[in-house]
Image (cartoon, rainbow, N blue to C red):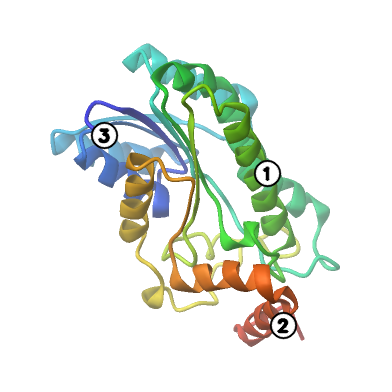
Amino acid sequence: MKDKVVIITGASSGIGKACAIDFAARGAKVVCASRNIDELKKLENSLTQKGYDAFAVKTDVTVEEECKHLIDKTLEKYGKIDILLNNAGISMRALFKDVDLAVMKKLLDVNFWGAVYCTKYALPYILQSKGSVVGVTSIAGFHGLPGRSGYSASKFALHGFLETLRIENLKNGLHVLIAAPGFTASNVRKSALLADGTPQGESPLNENKLIPAEKVAQKIAKGILHRKRNIIISFEGKISVLLQRIIPTSLDKLFYNHMAKEPNSPFK
């Protein structure tokens, strides 16, 4: 990745932050984007102090103009774009019958439209470099997850968008990677929205037993370097995708039972 210009959304924490650190160590020029400018600046400073090339741009990916601004600032500083990592995302935890529709809209705005906006404005320059567009998705984009209807809908939409983008550019040298990490240790569950739109605050999972974000970052980096089509990072995720193809009804029951056993599950 030496001297490759990489834009990473959702870079202030979790997988995005881990990717920024990993990619910078590989020699990339990393543009870190997030709404949280304080955390972005801390990340930028920690990377530059190590001699890496990093640049922070405050960005709310739900706002089209801010996504365009992110691309413009990247080009202004570096003059090119090689890789766009669409990582910004939020989750939810509520049954559809109970959820405020504003929560559903917010999930689609961040997880789907944020990726669409950034990709739209970055694509001409990534095509010039024959680079990569990456979407950090989820097993929820392969099979619906109970209690996470908006999250699953956004990830299914992102999958469809990225697959179509890949096919449309078969002869243009564009690499499109769909990366499904599985359950990763991050803040995504703490900030997951409940039925009324408030953050749940506490993760229902034991975060210490989940995949470290650093490992996910390494896998994504390898997926980019080897120009992989799809990567499913967790063993459970690989099994789930396999079961979805051969015994989907049984997978429905497995997901239901798993969700029902979580602390404070929306299934009463």
- Mark 2 vs 3: CB contact within 8 A: no
Pointer 3: what residue?
Answer: 1
Left or right, residue 41 beside residue 91? left
Q: Residue at x 35, y 54 (%)?
A: 219
SS class of the residue under badge 3? loop
| Residue in the foreground of this view, choosing between 252 and 209 | 252
**x, y percent for residue 223:** 38, 47
Mark 1 and mark 2: span between their CA atoms?
25 Å
Residue at the spot of label 2? 253
In the picture shown, does residue 254 fall above or below 190? below
Quarter where residue 50 is shown? top left
- The N terminus lies in which quarter of the figure? top left
Other-residue count near label 3 (Cα within 10 Å), few / some / many at <14 / 14–19 / ≥20: some
Q: Residue at x 47, y 43 (%)?
A: 10
Q: In the rendered structure, which amino acid carries the disc numbered 3?
A: Met
Residue at figure coordinates x 40%, y 55% from the top left: 14
Give the mark, 1 or 2, whose residue is nearer the N terminus.
1
Where does label 1 land, which residue?
160
For residue 250, side relative to residue 120 (left or right): right
